[in-house]
Image: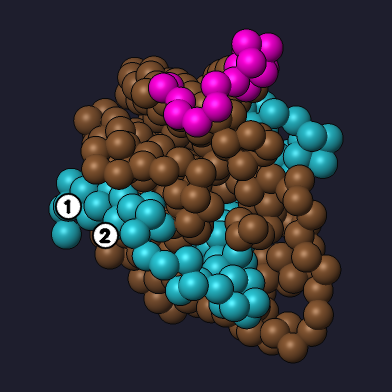
Amino acid sequence: MTTVADTPLPEARRREVMRQALSVGAATGAYGISFGALAVASGLTVLQTQALSLLLFSGGSQFAVVGVLGAGGFGLAAVAASTLLGVRNGLYALQTSRFLGVAGLRRLAAAHLTIDESTAVGVAQPERAAQRLGFWVTGVAVFVGWNLMTLVGALVGNAIGDPRSYGLDAAAAAAFAALLWPRLRSGDAVATAVLAAFVALVAAPALPAGVPVILAAGAAVAVGLRRGGRHERPPSPDAEPHGADPLP
Amino acid sequence: MTTWATVLLACAAAFGLKLAGYLVPAGWVRGERRSRVIALLPVALLAALVAVQTVVGDGGALLLDARAAALAAAVVLLVLRANFLVVVGAAAAVAGILRALGWA
């Protein structure tokens, strides 16, 4: 999976990219333990939890599924919240498809591995061969680590009993806050977050669980369109895709 | 909808979006306004999830309990640039301790 076309990378560069990719993979994979524990705490079985990490493989969307279901929301609301959060992966794919040059089965594999981290490491490299190596190694490393640690978290979460007494339900909000935090870099992002939280809380007492979160997506539309006429500085080239703007 | 149907549908939709990025012309999502709305989508959803998970109780009522204290601890740690797992673990610990003490 790490065969690289075009000009081969010098050994020193290859090792540099590998080190970066594997360290991102190890760090991110470790978060899987919190997903596994929170998923079983919200009522999913170990198998359902593992299916999300294997097949959905996008942290924010996975947390959204278990968050909405755990709060008693109905299935379609969980799917909608998860899917709206996954839109950014499709945008990353527009970028990564330019340097990966994949077709057929390799394209399906690349699509599955297109997430925050693999995109970030890939686009950060100056040479094409390093972009490809960085994307694939990061994607596979995160996939393996995330899935193994999901299993550990799910088994531990299952074994310890009532999740409420360990505060695991409260940890879900902290997980979402930690995912949100690095995105709050612009005034628009902060305005969107405040408006979205407000909409969700106003709607919560009146609507079924999960629906307020979907309604809050309107905050992105309201803020994004409102500022449409104003000129903003372009995103800096070294901004991580974690940040506000996933587009080049 | 069963939990399995929810899980598998969410998986299919996520993969479909990822694959679509390899198949559609990039021009579909060009345009300053469109790309800004798309970039702000995760912000809106995550903020709403934080709010709902923190203060919405059973039946949709708003209430302040151990979860709010846990979130406050998480925010302090995020300001201090703590690692993701530290943030999540500390929030769970704060809520668990407050409940064990019977304070929330």
User: Coloured how?
Assistant: by chain
Q: Nearer the viewer, residue A63 or A11?
A: A11
**How many residues crowd around disc 1 within 10 Å: few (fewer than 14), some, or many (20 or more)?**
few
Residue A164 appears at what percent x and percent y? 46, 36
Q: Are marks 2 and 1 on the same chain?
A: no
Q: Is residue A134 left or right of residue A193?
A: left
Number of the label disc, if any, that sits on residue A75: 2
The residue at which mark 1 appears reads as B5
Q: How many marks?
A: 2
Which chain is indicated by disc 1? B
Can residue A96 be seen at all in this image of the molecule? yes
Residue A245 appears at what percent x and percent y? 66, 59
Label 1 amino acid?
Ala
Instruction: Identify the chain drawn in cyan.
Output: B
**How many residues crowd around disc 2 within 10 Å: few (fewer than 14), some, or many (20 or more)?**
many
Residue under the image location 60 percent in, 64 percent down: B39
Q: Determine contact: label 2, label 1, CB under 8 Å.
A: yes
Residue under the image location 79 percent in, 84 percent down: A230
Helix, strand or loop at mark 1? helix
In reply to whether residue A16 is colored magenta, the answer given is: yes
Q: Is residue A1 left or right of residue A128?
A: left
Q: Which residues are magenta?
A: A2-17
Q: Give the colour chain A carries in the figure.
A: brown
